[in-house]
Image (spheres, rainbow, N blue to C red):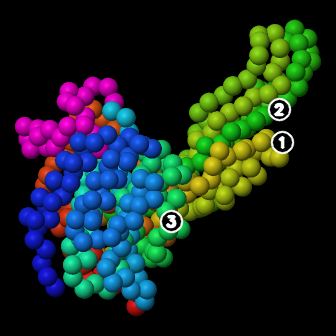
Amino acid sequence: MAVPDNDELFYDALGLLRNLISVPSLSRDESAAADIIWLFLKERGFDPDRSGNNVWAVSPGFDETKPTVLLNSHIDTVRPSDGWTTDPFTPVDGADGRIIGLGSNDAGASVVSLAVSFVYLCSIPQKCNFVFLASCEEEVSGRGGLESVVPLLPPIDVAIVGEPTNMQPAVSEKGLMVIDAEVRGRAGHAAREEGDNAIYRALPVIEKLKNLCFDKVSPTLGPVKISVTQIQAGTQHNVVPALCTMVIDVRTTDAYSNEETLLIMRNAVGKDVALVPRSTRLNPSGIDLGHPLVKRMVMLGAKPFGSPTLSDQALMPWPSVKIGPGDSSRSHTADEYIYPHEIRDAVAFYTTVLSGLAIRC
């Protein structure tokens, strides 16, 4: 097997990262970053596709009889937070060698590491097809991002999702449901014994949700977590409220689908309480620890874990592993940064794990 020129890949990745930092790519406004990715792939002999601000390329000589691995990360960023001491859109070299810039850690380092790894993997014979996808709108879970291009991609067997995990594989990830709840009573005058106070009716509902236990517990993510985060009721001080509304934040696990979790919650609170999810599309995800991709990572010393943070894994209908350079604690912070050696190590890891990968018997 050919050995990649790590220096060439490394400097290619650094140059691409600096270019990406230099253009604003806030969620839903990633056009300039998508242009950069498209040109990067085109200049290296690929025929990239684009839909909106999503850009992807497929292995030359794509073979439908082979399994296909998706290499994905996102090009959008959050808005710069307060406290930046440099221009967020200018890559700055810090005194300790770090590269400072918006999106450098989340998830520019993953994008460029996966991009150059894809270029290398496509240069030698492989047992798998590879698809590289730089997607948009990840930070806002937008419908114009990864979800919109899933039908346009070839059938995918497994995916690597690039996010800052210190190059440790997240083999499961929590999902999210935001639920609007309504508890109804009957209005009345507060000075008389009349009405049915919706706030009082809501109290046992809150208690049931607080103490709700699920039979199954994820070995990597723990139990489903339910939090009542907002409550609103009443119109004035002397009117017994007829309606109490609540917002419930539910962090689901790979032990249950979002729909299964919602059904258990509805059965617990009873038919008189309305639980209406704003969406059930951000599902929990997980991959078998015995999957060949995971086993290869473990052989290289990586330690699987369960991730509490959401990513585009939630929108993928296939197994996936979240792994990338950088540290999640730096994401969305002022003076966000990545160390160059983290990118070098990521490229070496990706190319070693994926070269010659066989995921079917």
The residue that mark 3 highlights is 150
Q: Which corner quadrant holds the C terminus? A: bottom left
Residue 294 visible in image: no
Earlier in the chain: of badge 2 and badge 1, it is 2
Q: Which mark is residue 272?
A: 1
Residue at position x 33%, y 33% from top?
A: 80
Q: Position of residue 309 (x, y in %)?
A: 43, 49
Which of the 4 quarters of the picture holds residue 100?
top left
CA gap, disc 2 to disc 3? 41 Å
CA gap, disc 2 to disc 1? 8 Å
Question: Is residue 33 toward the left or the right of residue 17 in the image?
Answer: right
**Nearer the observer, 108 or 236:** 108
Q: Position of residue 56 (x, y in %)?
A: 37, 65
Q: Which corner quadrant holds the N terminus? A: bottom left
Residue at position x 46%, y 70% from top?
A: 153
Q: Which mark is residue 184?
A: 2
Residue 100 lies in the magenta-colored region: yes
Which of the 4 quarters of the picture holds residue 161?
bottom left
State yes or no: discs 2 and 1 in contact (Cβ < 8 Å): yes
How packed mark 2 is, by other alpha carbons closer than 10 Å (few <14, some 14-19, many 20 or more), is some
Under tag 1, what secondary structure? loop
Disc number lying in front (2 or 3):
3
Q: Position of residue 215 (x, y in %)?
A: 62, 60
The stretch in magenta equals 81-104
CA gap, disc 1 to disc 3? 38 Å
Residue at position x 68%, y 39% from top?
A: 180
